[in-house]
């Protein structure tokens, strides 16, 4: 008997590298005016981004060569290391924006929540595999899983980073949903989490300000309201085919975070509706291939891990695009593989490498040789 399977999913690799390479031009254009105003050179921010792009691409291939099954063996240590980093952040190591989300090491900064969300998915995938026979039980199976989810979600929310915390919680619930966890346990958890989330929102002024600014479209264009307004204007300026690469008006300090959280608006202005539609199509294609890998993987750990990785990337893309188009309030969530930001780009690229390794070990067809 011989077993024939697929090699690494080349279409995911091509799609992700296309987005990463595209990000070089997008970040350069979106950051050029700000970079010129602050450093006297339009290439300042883009040069740093190019270095991160190179490292991200290298990490894709490196992680694609490492057998993903090794993460099951060390999943507990990976997750507790991530939790320790989150605790360390809360002890007072702040970013330049005075928000406790970053660990600063000299000129380098690192955002632990980007690592923690995948560390949690890795350990949950291991536990769902290990506890398969009794994961449906409340005390022995489900509550230990919920404990890890609640701990990571709470630590990220306390930074404060409510949007990322909700993505982590939602992605984890979806992962449990496709497993043997009982649906009633998941529903009770979600229902119980709603009042907790509402209480957290009411206790955090910055979240309430974002919601109030979003709800009152007639309010003065300041703060987060201005960001959403300018983002929508940028998309509108682009029309069907865009104003052309490098010709965005919104990047000229009209749109804050133009090269970060709101880069999708700059892409829409410069490349038009057609350009944004192509970006959306690439993400849909990546998700389709990712979920296909999950469905075809016979190993439970690989099945859950590939589903979790794909879900997190999809969630970030959806949330960012909804913010840029004014569908939901501002969240501060970047576009995977396109927005400026080293930690997210590199960690997301590493996760894609893991996904490629899982795809290379799928056993999708068995043939019996005579």
Image (tube, grey):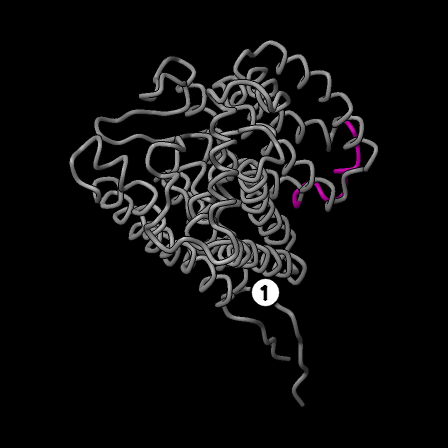
State left or right for residue 214 relative to residue 61: right
Q: Which residues are magenta?
A: 129-138
User: In terms of secondary structure, where does tag 1 sit?
Assistant: loop
Is 178 located above or below residue 9 in the figure? above
Q: Is residue 121 magenta?
A: no
Q: Nearer the viewer, residue 135 or 29?
A: 29
Identify the residue at horizontal 45%, vertical 38% (top origin): 262
Q: Nearer the viewer, residue 37 or 173?
A: 37
Is 264 located above or below residue 85 in the figure? below
State left or right for residue 54 relative to residue 303: left
Q: Quadrant of the N terminus?
A: bottom right
Residue 311, x across and y down, in percent: 60, 46
Identify the residue at horizontal 80%, vertical 26% (top origin): 188
Q: Nearer the viewer, residue 251 or 323?
A: 251
Q: Residues within 10 Å of mark 1 (few under 14, many from 20)?
A: many
State left or right for residue 248 relative to residue 155: left
Q: Which residue is mark 1?
A: 362
């Amino acid at each position: 008997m011989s077993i024939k399977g697929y090699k690494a999913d080349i279409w995911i690799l091509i799609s992700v590298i296309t987005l990463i390479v595209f990000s070089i031009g997008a970040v350069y254009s979106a950051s050029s005016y700000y970079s010129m105003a602050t450093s006297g050179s339009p290439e300042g921010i883009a040069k740093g981004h190019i270095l991160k792009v190179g490292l991200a691409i290298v990490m894709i291939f490196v992680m694609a060569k490492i057998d993903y099954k090794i993460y099951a063996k060390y999943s507990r240590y990976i997750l507790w290391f991530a939790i320790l980093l989150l605790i360390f952040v809360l002890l007072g190591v702040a970013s330049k924006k005075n928000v406790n989300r970053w660990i600063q090491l000299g000129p380098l900064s690192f955002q632990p929540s980007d690592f923690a969300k995948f560390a949690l998915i890795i350990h949950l995938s291991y536990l769902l595999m290990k506890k398969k026979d009794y994961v449906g039980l409340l005390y022995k199976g489900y509550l230990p899983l919920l404990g890890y989810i609640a701990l990571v979600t709470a630590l990220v929310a306390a930074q404060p980073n409510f949007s990322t915390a909700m993505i982590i919680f939602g992605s984890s619930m979806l992962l449990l949903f496709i497993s043997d966890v009982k649906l009633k346990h998941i529903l009770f958890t979600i229902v119980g989490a709603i009042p907790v989330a509402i209480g957290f929102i009411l206790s955090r002024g910055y979240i309430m300000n974002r919601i109030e600014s979003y709800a009152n479209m007639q309010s003065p264009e300041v703060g987060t309201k201005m960001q959403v307004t300018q983002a929508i204007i940028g998309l509108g300026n682009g029309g069907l085919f865009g104003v052309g690469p490098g010709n965005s008006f919104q990047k000229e300090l009209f749109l804050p975070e133009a090269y970060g959280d709101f880069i999708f608006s700059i892409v829409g202005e410069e490349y038009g509706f057609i350009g944004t539609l192509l970006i959306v199509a690439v993400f849909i294609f990546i998700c389709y291939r990712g979920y296909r890998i999950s469905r075809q993987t016979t190993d439970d750990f690989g099945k859950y891990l590939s589903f979790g990785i794909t879900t997190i990337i999809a969630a970030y893309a959806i949330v960012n695009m909804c913010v840029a188009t004014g569908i939901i309030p501002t969240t501060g969530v970047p576009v995977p593989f396109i927005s400026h930001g080293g930690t997210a780009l590199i960690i997301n690229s590493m996760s894609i490498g893991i996904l490629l390794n899982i795809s290379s070990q799928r056993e999708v067809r068995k043939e019996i040789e005579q």
